[in-house]
Image (tube, rainbow, N blue to C red):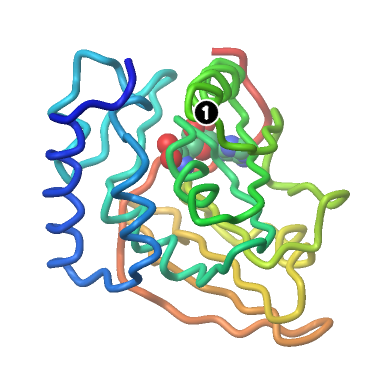
Amino acid sequence: MTDSFEARGLREKLIESIRQKGISDEEVLRAMKKVPRHIFMDPAFLHHAYVDKAFPIASGQTISQPYTVAFQTSLLSVKKRDKVLEIGTGSGYQAAILAEMGVRVYTIERCRELFLKAQQTIATLGYNIHFFYGDGFEGKEQYGPYDGILITAAAPEIPPALLKQLKTGGRLVVPLGKGDYQVMTVAVRTGEETWEYSSHGTFVFVPLLRGTQEK
Ligand code: SAH
């Protein structure tokens, strides 16, 4: 299923509602108006794709709430040609938003079924994204260092390997916490061994898990 007039109309309304909720990064809003979110979900759920809610995908995982995608992407403060590593490809929607913004995207998924499906979806949209199957705790050192690292699952702590794969001045965005909710945290690498941290409200994510799985 490709994009449609109806989907574009629904998307326009959704993005305006996200703007009302305080997202002001025009480049983020533009990308979210462009990328058809329904293509990342089951085709039966067109209307669900354009309400501001997380939604189940395969393997007990979720496509993040649109507001959360907008918020995390805004916190990353990326510009065209920046190199970004995403941990938790899921449906591939967040990766598509970054690619639409002209970012060079590297994304890791631990569940093989999702890893395969996300690539198929992205192929229909034509974005050039680098997909990896594996455990994101270790990052992808060989393609780093990165201008930005985005973790889209709840991390009990920031994986140390990821902090090391940031460029100086680079930003890592992660929902941090072990409990029912997480604190959105930004770590900016300020030097070889120094990072500065800031907190940006609470969110609810599925957990970052160790190892890989087939389904
Ligand atoms: N960014 C996604 C939403 C992801 S939900 C989207 O736009 O749809 C979180 C994802 O992180 C799930 O798909 C889950 O399988 C994946 N995940 C959890 N732990 C991981 C790990 N250690 N490495 C890579 N992916 C992981």
Q: Is residue 106 left or right of residue 116?
A: right
Instruction: Residue 122 in the image: state x and y as whole percent.
Output: 52, 28
> In this picture, is 120 found above or below 89?
above
Instruction: Classify residue 3 by image quadrant.
Output: top left
Q: Which residue is mark 1?
A: 122
Q: Position of residue 158 (x, y in %)?
A: 61, 62
Extreme front residue here?
Answer: 5
User: Horizontal and vertical percent for residue 201?
Assistant: 31, 71
Horizontally, residue 101 falls left or right of residue 202, namely right
Give the residue displayed 61% in from the left and 33% down from the top.
Answer: 109
Q: Is residue 38 left or right of residue 108?
A: left
Q: Which quadrant of the structure image shows residue 123?
A: top right
Residue at (66% x, 61% y) in the render: 81
Q: Nearer the viewer, residue 103 or 190?
A: 103
Name the one closer to the observer, 164 or 127: 127
Q: Quadrant of the C terminus?
A: top right
Residue 209 visible at all: no
Count of numbered circles in the view: 1
Along the viewing direction, whichever of 80 and 170 lies nearer the viewer: 80
123 shown above or below 109: above
SS of the residue under disc 1:
helix
Residue 206: quadrant of the picture: top left
The residue positioned 41% from the left and 68% from the top of the image is 74
Q: Is residue 5 above or below residue 156?
A: above
| Disc 1 residue type (three-letter) | Ile
Above or below for 22 versus 126: below
In the picture, measured across the screen, residue 41 lies left or right of residue 95, that is left
Mark 1 Cα shell of 10 Å, populated few (<14), some (14-19), many (≥20):
some
